[in-house]
Image (tube, rainbow, N blue to C red):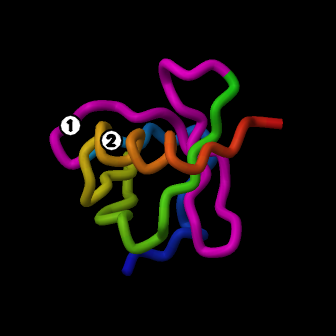
């Protein structure tokens, strides 16, 4: 598992097929918070186990559509 605390706020977050999901907004309770592109003010909670790599960019083990679909079931709006 990737050390989520090493992820810098504002780092681009990409799905497993290369699409940009949004930008890292922090870490909370073992989940990566992502300000989502395309959903103004939306903040997604991505489980830490979905983070595959976090160096120059964050890469997930799920596609953007899979992450958004999960989020639409349980949205957390930005502050």
Q: Nearer the viewer, residue 29 or 6?
A: 29
Q: Residue at x 26, y 54 (%)?
A: 62
Q: Residue at x 36, y 65 (%)?
A: 50
Cα distance, mark 2 to mark 1?
Answer: 6 Å
Q: Nearer the viewer, residue 75 or 78?
A: 75
Residue that carries the numbered disc 2 in the rendered image: 14
In the displayed structure image, the side of residue 3 where residue 66 appears, left or right: left
Tell me, yes or no, whether the two marked residues, 2 and 1, touch with CB atoms within 8 Å.
Answer: yes
Q: Which of the numbered marks, if any, corresponds to residue 18?
A: 1
Q: Residue at x 58, y 66 (%)?
A: 31
Q: Nearer the viewer, residue 43 or 74?
A: 74
Residue 25 at x, y percent in the picture: 65, 45
**Secondary structure category for the residue under label 1:** loop
Q: Crowdedness of circle 1 by 10 Å Cα count: few (<14), some, many (20+)? A: few
Residue 46 at x, y percent in the picture: 49, 57
**What are the residue bounds of the magenta stretch?**
16-40
In the displayed structure image, the side of residue 32 where residue 28 appears, left or right: right
């Amino acid at each position: 598992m990737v050390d989520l605390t090493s992820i810098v706020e504002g780092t681009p977050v990409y799905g497993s097929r290369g699409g940009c999901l949004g930008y890292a907004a922090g870490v909370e309770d073992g989940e990566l918070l992502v300000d989502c592109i395309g959903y103004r003010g939306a903040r997604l909670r991505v489980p830490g186990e979905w983070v595959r790599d976090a160096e120059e960019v964050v890469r997930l083990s799920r596609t953007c559509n899979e992450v958004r679909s999960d989020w639409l079931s349980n949205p957390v709006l930005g502050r």
